[in-house]
Image (cartoon, rainbow, N blue to C red):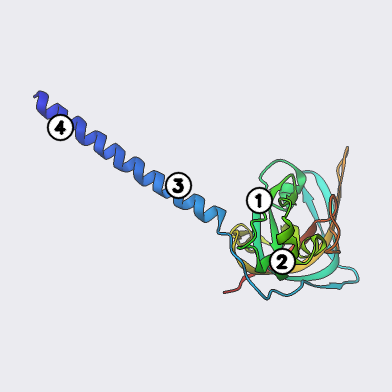
Amino acid sequence: MKKSRLETRDKLIIFLVIVGAVFLALFIAHSIYMSGTRRGIAGIREPLQETVNGGGMHRNADGFETDITFKCYYDIEALVLSTHDYNGSELSDKFAPVDAALGWGKVAQYNDIIDFNWEQSGRFCRCDPLSAADVKLLGSIEYVQEHFSNNHLIPAEKDVEKKIKKIRKGDHIRIRGYLVNVDGSSEDASFHWHSSTSRSDTGNGACEIIYVTNVDWIE
């Protein structure tokens, strides 16, 4: 009887170890998928931007009566450098659940050679200081600033939102839509979120806020 109980216990331990290993492998695989892969892609063009006259929509979000105003038509092909999900209670999180840091030109081309160490938090995107050799390869610090952007992605509809949430580091994508201003007010507060329309600005207010109508993956 003791031997039988020991065998049963040993089998249970082996079973639990196997189950644990399977769950660990699935967790690691999911983490790798979610984080994406750093790579470089050469030949990605500059974003296309065209001023529009009027257009937009009205939304109610968390008690805020909000106007989304179209500023420019925007068409960006890019390498995804990093992504960050925003699932908090801020009004901006309700509008744009995902930020995507996007690169083109030499920033995208040399992203696998130069470890920029892209980091996103608090709706900002930062990279590590570059070495003199890295700057020489890219041309200048100003070139880097003008060839990547942090983008707050506002989905136009649910199907677009599903696509936005599938964007991963290393993807080669094309996003089309509008650079927008978001202005809202409630009984006791106001909300103003305005898009940059320049690729050369930095700091607070330099991010692009894109009302996304299309997301496509480029093979």
Q: Where does label 4 land, which residue?
A: 7
The residue mark sitting in front, 2 or 3, is 2
- Which mark, residue 27? 3
- Three-letter code, disc 1: His
Instruction: Point out the tag, 4 or 1, that comes first from the N-terminus.
Output: 4
Q: Would residue 36 appear left or right of 64 to someone viewing this image?
A: left
Quadrant assignment for the C terminus: bottom right
- Which mark, residue 137? 2
Whole-angstrom CA distance, mark 3 to mark 4, is 30 Å
**Residue 51 in view here:** yes
Of 157 and 172, nearer the camera is 172
Residue 197 spot, x, y in % from top left: 86, 64
Residue density around tag 4, few if under 14, some if 14–19, many if 20 or more, within 10 Å: few
Instruction: Point out the tag, 4 or 2, that comes first from the N-terminus.
Output: 4
Of 25 and 143, nearer the camera is 143
Circle 4 SS class: helix
- Three-letter code, disc 3: Phe
**Residue 215 in view here:** no
Of 170 and 174, nearer the camera is 170
- Which mark, residue 84? 1
- Is 60 above or below relative to 38? above
Q: Which residue lies furthest to the top in this view?
A: 2
Place residue 18 in its image quadrant.
top left
Whole-angstrom CA distance, mark 1 to mark 2, is 28 Å
Residue under the image location 77 percent in, 67 percent down: 139
Residue under the image location 8 percent in, 24 percent down: 1
